[in-house]
Image: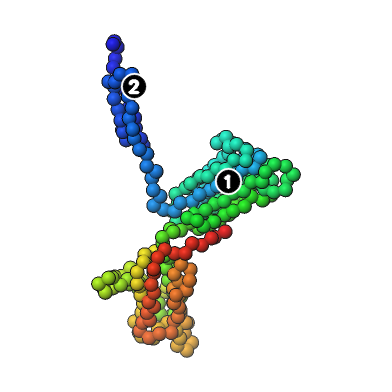
Amino acid sequence: SHGGEGYYVVALNGAVIFQGAEFESIETAVFEVIEPTCDQAEVDVTIFFDDDPDETSWSIARVSAFGDDVVMATFDAMEREVKMRAEHTESLCLEEGLYRFTIHDKARDGLCCGHGHGQDGNYTVMSHGSVLAHGGDFVGSNKTSTFNVTDPNCNRVNVNVVFDDYPELTSWDIRRFSTLGHEIVEMEYDAGNGEIEHTESICLGEGQYKFTIYDDDGYGMCCESGEKAGHYNVTLNGVVIGEGGEFGSNEAIAFNITGPPPRQSLG
């Protein structure tokens, strides 16, 4: 042997998993690649391409409250050299929020249907078994669908309160009953002077809960003669579980959560 010594390094995601230099004719290393888990929401975009896949591309963008969409993923069939009539799925890991899926067709005739030649195509966007967007037949350069992404294991409780003339007297909380019988505060809110309406949202797991709304003066939120009436509304996974406004010093609603929320197709 002559000259400088050589060596090799095998790295996975920046971490060295094997290295060496001294061996005879061959050296082998065995390693395992484990697909990372998505701790948010998995969204799959599947395209069945027509006879002209090079015309097709798509994007998913998060809708911003400030009006500027944030592009989260793009796909261009021409760049990826997709074959005609092929099927392709891209999987994304997205946090909760409002998203916009846009599919583009350069020929302005969509993926489907009745154009006199070839095979029809279609697209489907899904998350945890629920269809978020589906189609194929569109005219023009693109078609857009808007959908919400939610945690499939999140039981969403929303509390909406429209205040009377004395919001500073109103407060509420949600408590969970422990296995030992103790009440554990999961959410609480004290309204301030001048508030008109307020909404709170919380994600809860399985258990027994109680929502309680309080009025410091003991007259509830509704209704003295000539005064503005207030009211509250509580929903669990979009279903109303309690509402009202006429009560004394407080009013309580007990509810149980026994498992994950039902799957809903947003279309």
The residue labelled by disc 1 is 47
**Horizontal relation, residue 36 to residue 123: left or right:** left
Q: Residue 201, relative to residue 29: is it above or below? A: below
Name the quadrant of the N terminus. top left
Q: Residue furthest left?
A: 180
Residue at image location 64% in from the left, 50% down from the top? 136
Q: Quadrant of residue 86?
A: top right
Residue at image location 46% in from the left, 51% down from the top? 42
The 10 Å Cα crowd at callout 2, few under 14, some 14 to 19, many 20 or more, is few
Query: In the structure shown, which secondary structural element does the residue marked by tag 1 occupy?
Result: strand
Q: Quadrant of residue 81?
A: top right
Structure colour scheme: rainbow
Whether residue 98 is visible to the viewer of this picture, yes or no, is no
The 10 Å Cα crowd at callout 1, few under 14, some 14 to 19, many 20 or more, is many
Q: Amino acid at mark 1?
A: Ile
Residue at image location 27% in from the left, 70% down from the top? 179
Q: Residue furthest top?
A: 2
Query: In the structure shown, which secondary structural element does the residue marked by tag 2 occupy?
Result: loop
Q: Nearer the viewer, residue 95 or 119?
A: 119
Q: Nearer the viewer, residue 194 or 24?
A: 24
Counting from the top left corner in percent of width and height, residue 73 is at: 50, 45
Query: Mark 1 or mark 2, which is nearer the start of the sequence?
Result: 2
Cα distance, mark 2 to mark 1? 43 Å
Q: Amino acid at mark 2?
A: Ile
The residue labelled by disc 2 is 26
